[in-house]
Amino acid sequence: MNLNCHNILRWTEAQLKYTYDVSLEDATPQELHEALGQAVMMAISDNWSKAKKTRLHQRKAYYISAEYLIGRLVYSNLFNLGILDEMKALFAQRGVDLAVLEDIEDDALGNGGLGRLAACFLDSAVTTNIPLSGYGLRYKFGLFKQSFDANGSQVEKADDWTKFGDPWSYRRYNHTVKIRFPEHTVLAVPYDVPIIGYGTNNIGTLRLWQCEAENELDFGAFNDQDYLRALDAKNKAEDITRVLYPNDSTWEGKRLRIKQQYVLSSASLQDMIRTYKSAYGNDLRHFADHYAVQLNDTHPAMSIPELMRLLMEEGMSFDDAFAIAQKTFSYTNHTVMGEALEKWPLDLMRSVVPEIVDIICRIDQKLKCEHPNLFIVKDNTAHMANLSVYVGSYVNGVAEIHSQILKDDCFKDWYQVYPERFQNKTNGITPRRWLGLCNPELTELISEKVGGDFLRDLDRIGELKPLIDDEMVKKFNAIKRLKKEQLCAVVKKHEGVELNPDFIFDVQVKRLHEYKRQLLNILSVVDIYFRLKEGRLPDFRPTVYLFGAKSAPGYARAKAIIRYINRVAKLINNDPAVADKLKVVFVQNYNCSYAEHIIPAADISEQISPAGTEASGTGNMKLMLNGAVTLGTLDGANVEIAQEAGMDNEYIFGHTVEEINAARPNYYARGIYDYNADLRRAINTLVDGTVPTDGDQQELFHALLDGTNWHKADHYFLLLDYESYLEAKLRANRDYGDRMAFGRKCLMNVASAAKFSSDRTIRQYAEEIWHIKPIEY
Ligand code: 26Q
């Protein structure tokens, strides 16, 4: 794109003057961000409308997702436009350091992996010129902001992300649609976010729906001086998109959640039908020839009956509507854990979306006629995953092992009937944000070697492999050291904790969940701590164990784990006996922007879920691309990471899926506890007072050793994998001593990361699921 940076600077100044009456020099970071954002929006507007026109009559795909974790947009947009450095320099000439925009908060309209994947996909689709648009919800409050109190407990605060404005979207009131519920009709107002590609003139669109009332004020009530009631309708409508549900693992049957999902589904489908009609006329029978829709998990699965409802409203028969829906939709599954699968009680659903329930029941009857052993409705409950498999073209998992488990277990009966529907699409990450933007130093080193713009074609990174020599390893090690220094400054600023960049950086960053086994990690650290004090680890290389994770606010056990880790950190960090060997830090409010600092600094990437539980993981890919070795199980995408980089370049431990399944029936965690004295001592710190704890750690202790009403003891097999985990962890620590050999492993990871570009993933979706081709611009 041919952009004039001087113009953007001038427009920024003008915006500052006219909206805030401040000069460039006096603007706050927030004012600067608003003005610069608006200037960039002006600069791209021609290209944006051109790209929309080019797509108009092409077969297109739509990604419908309840979450988009797009992070901070200002740097990535400038980066993708290719003007980040020049803009920094221009602002610097005016005495303004664009680093002040580090204060701008993330757009966090998502919980974790699933939402970040949606954001990476949009970046990749636009960059590779694949006609894909996104639909989502514009929550007033994104994922909560996290801090820790003096006890080390998580405290949540509302994320009012638009309080200073939102320069990266346009409100398009003229495309507002109505959504009907029995008790009220609400408006869904679209906000369009430009998705700026890298090295292309193409610009895509993410359309986010915001709920508003049809009539904001009830003047009858107002005239009766009943001011609160006068605002009822407004509040009830706005409640629907008020807040992102902060739960990413356990499913909750909440009325408001159905409403959210229905608004997302209905607004998006109405919008698609409107654009279809304007391009192809009123005959909707060819809808599926022009549109493919990808459902990001089952959160938007009501789109299926909603499309059918809209088609039938136009006079189409049930069977014809079914056939079109079946061709239009495909579904991506992101979890194998039963407790996360959406199962709506029909009565609840009927009170919110009665017509949708009728259609689901008709679909279910059709299914039961064809295949009596399959069901969508059972015990008066609608199983949204089954609906999505039945009324869809394809269903896919997000890593090879996960897709296999879907066929073998979760959807076994379905796989027998519809084997041709099942696919795999291993996740990916955008190398622009997760290398180019967050690690320009490593990007530069790679580009010196492989030349050209490998960020557009990550396959080229493989060309590094034969070129890795001592000189390159030394340069890599120097960069890693620099990224650690930079991270130390960030951690000092945000946590007040001083880290030493000479330490090994061992990181586990991801949502907090029992299955991700942050507790396994910290127990091993406690064990290492005791051993160090006993002088049993004389060659141990100084290591900082860094955690970053948010817990769902209602997930008591996850919160107890956070508290425990924070208290272990306090104990260890205050013990002078290990000060030169061991440090533990749990950073607050881990988010995209924090990730961009942590990931380039990591030496060791902890990916330690028991095999068969983590669908894919994508943090593992980001860490690999930045040259961390994986300390991980054969779970999710770790399997493919190890395949690509070679087992010798990772630290793989633990039981395989088959081994865990074999061990499960007779698993006796207490046997391991009784047998392994070091592990026992570490586990006992949950209850024996060595680590100051509260009653909640007792509960963790019992869940590990005795079990609960819900689960047998140690449901996630921490004790089963402990020995091989600690062995691998200490081996990685020892290997780090040979800086050249270790650096070579790291570089082999970088050079083997090509497969994990979301450009590859999105191309596979386009070819194998949506059957669409890139557009020539
Ligand atoms: C469901 C019902 C009610 C409220 C919330 C939810 C909900 C919201 C978000 C359920 C699940 C999620 C998010 C799941 C998620 O992030 N899964 C992750 O997806 C990644 C991308 O495919 C994978 O890499 C991870 O392995 C998977 O855990």
Image (cartoon, rainbow, N blue to C red):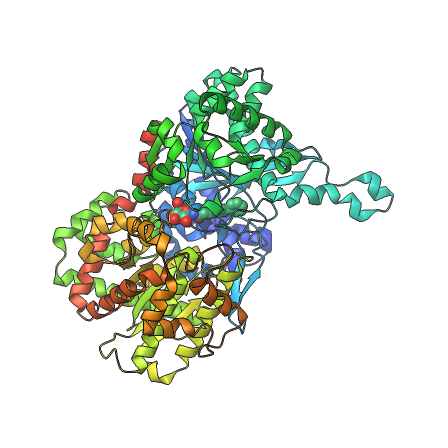
In what quadrant of the picture does the C terminus appear? Answer: top left
Asked if 322 appears above or below 138 in the picture, the reply is above
- The picture places residue 205, in percent across and down from the top left corner, at 46, 37
Q: Quadrant of residue 302?
A: top right
In depth, the one of 705 and 238 nearer the eye is 705
Residue 759 is situated, as x and y percent measured from the top left of the image, at: 31, 40
Q: Where does residue 101 sit, x and y in percent of width and height?
A: 46, 59
> Where does the N terminus fall, quadrant-wise?
top left
Which is nearer the eye, 652 or 415?
415
Up the image or down, 122 lies above or below 585; here it is: above
Q: Is residue 243 left or right of residue 623?
A: right
Residue 676 visible within the image: yes
Q: Is residue 436 visible?
A: no
| Front-most of residues 78 and 649 | 649
Residue lying at the far right of the rendered structure: 224
Q: Quadrant of residue 478?
A: bottom left
Vertical placement of 705 versus 615: above or below? below
